[in-house]
Amino acid sequence: MARSSRFVLLALLLAVAAVLIYRYRQHSQHLQNGVADTHPKPILIPGVTEPEEMRVEPFPKSAPTAPERMLGDAMKEIRGNSDPNALLPALDSILAKYPDYGDGYVMRLASLCNGKNHAAILSDINNALKYNTTSEDATDTKASMLSMKAKLEHDGGDDTAAMRDLDTAIHANLADAARFTNSGATAPGKTASACTWTEIDMDQLKQRFPNDYRSYLFAGLYYGFFSTWNDASLKPAMDNFAKAAELNPTSALPYFYKAHVMQQATFLKSMNWSDAQRAELNKHLLDELSKALALDPNLLPAITDRAEVYFSLKQFQQAIPDYDKAIALDPKDYGAYNDRGLSNMELGKTYDAISDFSDAIRLKPRELQKSDSYENRADAYLKTEQWALAIRDLTTAISLQTGGVSFLMNINQFRAIYPEYKPASDEAVALKLNQTFFPNLKYEDFSKSFLHDNVEKGFFSSSTLPDLYVKRSDAYLKEGDWHSAAVDFRRAANGFKRLATADRWRSIGTQQNSKLYIDMQTFDDSAITSMKLWTKQTEGTTDDSGPYSLDQYEFNCTTRQLRTVSFARYSATGNLLASRGDEKWESSIPDTLGETLLNDMCRSQK
């Protein structure tokens, strides 16, 4: 599906701490030292024939700076302590030694903002702005710091400066402008910390600047921030946007935010709506977004929002020009390429979709659990019957997904999915996964979870991974590699309990006006002289509810013979019509189902 609107649920100051703990830097130690080691070899376990998704380039190990190492050590010492002042002594020491450490000032604000020393707060805000200009999250930091600065200016009576800095803050990231509130609450409040905007502040700005549309725009964004969780906030948000549009009819922002906030506020609720209700909402969103784009045709977030609405309405042809425009304005937006690819898929332009997904993959950095474009391109390859290419992309997706959740799995589940690792010790498996996918975690921490703590919790539940294994299994079937198909089906069945309800009968095509399936659950090719499988044939090419027959075959690839072990024919209602079994071995007859099955079984053994 197209990218859906998402709201940030945590205040910036809380999020920064998590970012600092888990953030991976873009360059490995080799790159920082100027050594061109761009493709390190996979980390393999001797004596194990590892699956392709585990034979991958390790993720780069971070090279934390000295202040980051000091902060990490301090965080470990206060683990479990939720007091925002707990880190203050360590941060004071770090910043005294490394005054250009921008993230340190952001972190210290978590403590300072709970106090009343406005001069100290303002000093840290200015330093955070000064020293975060090249960091990965510089844009978000700038927006949040400016909104905090504006709040202090407002409290100090300088509302002109407050309006200026708030305006700059929302323009730093128009799509997430409502985050300027810096609130972790779920409803508007009348009191807050020194760095957090309140409902009273919004009223005061409107009273101070009754003819400035921005004061109403900011108020609309303020209420809009809470509208995802607080239904009562939606109406004042819309009312303030309407007033902003009235005061400045040439600005596109009030119309854009009316749609943007409405889309975010109803995202979860609309899942339980009727199709007619969702269609009515989308019509309203289109109207507001089109008004915004009539005033500012290059307003990028409005373009991407409208494309998403068109996609939701299944108006894929109308979505394409908006995706085209979004890509023209931001050629590095891999999400726009991905979503245009989805629209092209729906329009039957499969090769155009493949091109779009390829561009999205090229532009998007490799990231654990982020495999949508690989999965989407695999779907396109499946449609064009390019089985090997589909398998390749599904393998990459499985690698990113399995690697990403390995920290949540346990050794027993991993061995259930990958019996290939039987010769390896538990410690060797844990070390391989740690070094390949989570090199920034100490082995002691990774192994504690993977080998001990998670074992007590049982198998990790996932809907994504078993579906990927089954999809790759189907691709192997279509390619004629039934052995690999069976291996993948067993990976899903053995590793994830939810697959117990999955359809064991997998399609392998048609045979004389019948649909043909094989039972992957009982498929057995462990012995080349006695391989067995069940088949199911349903009459007709489209109706699965008609009469059907079940056959169990046994094959001997050495002698090129087969026999029917069991046969049963059923009516459409499931009544047994005929049965027989235990027939003699015989050679296959040319151009028959038996010969086709024998050839495919024996070919997959080679």
Image: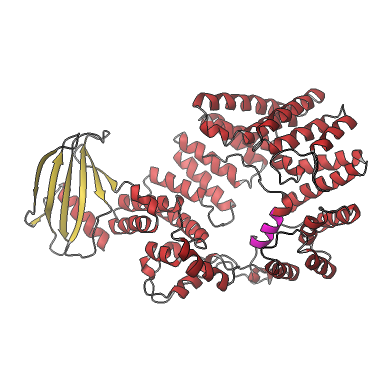
Observer-nearest of 457 and 363: 457
Within the image, what quadrant is residue 48 found in? bottom left
Which residue sits at x=7%, y=53%?
Answer: 583
Vertical relation: 52 (above or below) 550: below
Residue 137 in view here: no
Q: Residue 46: image x %, image y %?
A: 42, 77
Q: How is the image coloured?
A: secondary structure
Figure quadrant of the C terminus: bottom left
Q: Residue 517: image x %, image y %?
A: 25, 46
Q: Residue reaching furthest right?
A: 157
Horizontal side of 324 relative to 236 (left or right) equals: left
Which residue sits at x=64%, y=37%?
Answer: 228
Vertical relation: 430 (above or below) 304: below
Which residue sits at x=54%, y=39%?
Answer: 2
Check residue 454 for magenta coloring: no
Horizontal side of 457 relative to 193 (left or right) equals: left
* Number of marks: 0
Horizontal side of 431 relative to 171 (left or right) equals: left
Residue 79 in view here: yes
- In terms of secondary structure, what is the magenta stretch mainly? helix
Q: Residue 416: image x %, image y %?
A: 37, 63
Q: Residue reaching furthest left?
A: 584
Within the image, what quadrant is residue 320 found in? top right
Within the image, what quadrant is residue 54 found in? bottom left
Check residue 19 for magenta coloring: yes
Q: Residue 126: image x %, image y %?
A: 86, 54
Observer-nearest of 51 and 281: 281
Magenta segment, which residues? 15-22
